[in-house]
Image (tube, rainbow, N blue to C red):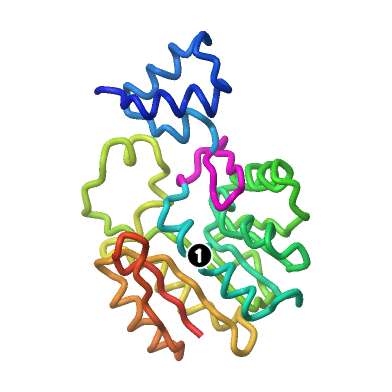
Amino acid sequence: MDTRREDVEALIQDKYQGDRGADMAEDLGRLMRGEPLAYVIGWIPFLGLTIHLDSRPLIPRPETEWWTEKLVQNLQDTYGSEPFRFLDLCAGSGAIGLAVLKHFPNANVSFGEIDEAHAALIRKNIAANNLPDADIRIGDLFAPFLGKVFDVIATNPPYIPEDRTLEDSVTKYEPEIALYGGEDGLSLIRRIITEAHTHLTPGGALWIEADMDNIEEAKSLMNEADFAATIHTDLYGRPRLLVGN
């Protein structure tokens, strides 16, 4: 496949510090085979942070960056400089929680992730961005957080229906466990909504990224679980974010 000129330019600038004489043959080959640019470079910017991708988590998307910025503004409006407890669930690279740490160094931030390899990555990203320490736990959804409660839980869980065809650059390189959410894409979201009340303080908020084709059903699930749920459209005008209180 052809390698886009802008990808090559980004590779030169972001990985080789503008050195056009560097030996880039291996990386150019990776791009030609369809590997995502972010993996080849090794990191991606996210709300002013450098998000390393060593353990190859799901690459943070612009729509996730968009709603994380909304989240940060909401936290500022709600808590200001007051401390609060925050959980980034299905954390992957930790981009969401890292953004919260950056803007709220007094917050008590936790990361939950099922893949143990990502724990070291989150720690690396905390150090690389000079952020305060955080609680990182490995396990199935809320299992590592028995007895813990949070003021806000935010999550970008696997939510793609299993029969959907994705681009080869996604299916060949990004982790399947972070993409597919069962037959209708809601298997993880159902569990998160069902279990969230046990881990939220009274009046706490649940932020969930979802798929445009299943977000209405996800909203119904939230309402049935006694959340007042609102759908927000993303930067592309697609329904993407579900917020429940």
- Where the N terminus falls, by quadrant? top left
Residue corresponding to mark 1? 155
Tell whether 103 sits left or right of 241. Answer: right
Could you tell me residue 207's position as x and y percent? 49, 72
Q: Is residue 57 magenta?
A: yes
**Where is 117 relative to 94, above or below?**
above
Please tell me in which quadrant of the rendered image residue 230 appears: bottom left
38 sits left or right of 50 in the view: left
Q: Quadrant of residue 161?
A: bottom left
Residue at (42% x, 65% y) in the render? 209
Which x, y percent locates residue 35?
Answer: 37, 30
Residue at figure coordinates x 52%, y 59% from the top left: 90
The answer to which image quadrant residue 243 occupies is bottom left
Location of residue 110 in the rendering, given as x and y in whole percent from the top left corner: 67, 63
Question: Which secondary structure, mark 1?
Answer: strand
- Give the magenta range: 44-59
| Closest to the observer, 84 or 135 | 84
Task: Locate residue 87 relative to residue 176 in the image: left or right.
Answer: right
Tell me, yes or no, whether the highlighted magenta stretch contains residue 232: no
- Taking the spot 60% from the left edge, 67% from the top edge, the residue there is 143
